[in-house]
Amino acid sequence: MKFIIGTKKHMVQYFAEDGKAYPATLVEAGPLTVTALKTNDNAGYSAVQVGFGTQKKERLSKPVLGHLKDKGPFRTLKEFRIEGATELKEGDVIDATVFTKGDTVRVSGLSKSKGFQGVVKRYNFKGGPRTHGQKHSEREPGSIGGGLRTRVPKGMRMAGRTGGDKVTLRNLEVLEVNLENNSLLIKGALPGRRGSLVEIVG
């Protein structure tokens, strides 16, 4: 199983050998440091815990610093579930070399947060009519009752907080692997804003 954590940079045009242009996203991937190994004996499941990024020691609690020991303060700690044994050891470094050009990956990240939004933007409602005596109903949700009920049914689509949800895209292709800058070029658009964290699993 291949995995890495990266920072989303920006989108570019990628020109393939056949001359076609594809949209692609540049990701600064890793390096990761293995901070702990979870096994069925000590934790009841198998996983690899890794640290990514840098952080000031003052911003971490004493239990976290004691857990990391001399591995250094990290911005993010993340576990990846694995099946069976692994060749990784504590202190090992994982970089972009785990992936090669043409690999198919799954990318997860937080979508852009949009705050409190109405039903037109949140659920693509049509809105009310603009004519025939209507004044200010262009973006209203309309009736939320059912005629025979005196309550609002559960699950009614209404205005509310939008975005900031975990989004996973599957079957994305790695177009290029840059070992000098430790970056990956992934086909298509990835969730989140620039600078947000994304998880890449192969």
Image: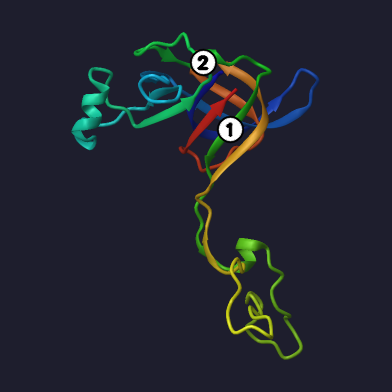
Quarter of the rendering containing residue 94: top left
Expressed as whole percent of the image width and height from the top left, the position of residue 199 reads: 51, 31
Expressed as whole percent of the image width and height from the top left, the position of residue 184 reads: 56, 23
In-front residue for pair 151/67: 151
Distance Cα–Cα, label 1 vs label 2? 23 Å
Name the quadrant of the N terminus. Answer: top right
Quarter of the rendering containing residue 51: top left
Examine the rendered structure and indicate whether residue 95 appears above or below residue 149.
above
Type of the residue with mark 2: Gly
Residue for point 68% across, 26% down: 14
Residue for point 66% across, 34% down: 188
Can you identify the residue that label 1 sits on?
A: 107
Can you identify the residue that label 2 sits on?
A: 84
Q: Is residue 66 left or right of residue 108?
A: left
The residue furthest bottom is: 133
The disc placed on residue 91 is none
Which of disc 2 and disc 1 is earlier in sequence? 2
Quarter of the rendering containing residue 118: bottom right
Mark 1 Cα-neighbour bin, 10 Å: few <14, some 14–19, many ≥20 = many
- SS state under label 2: loop
Expressed as whole percent of the image width and height from the top left, the position of residue 170 reads: 66, 33
In-front residue for pair 170/47: 47
Residues tagged 1 and 2 counted as in contact (Cβ below 8 A):
no
Type of the residue with mark 1: Val
- SS state under label 1: strand
Expressed as whole percent of the image width and height from the top left, the position of residue 201 reads: 56, 26
Residue for point 52% across, 48% down: 165
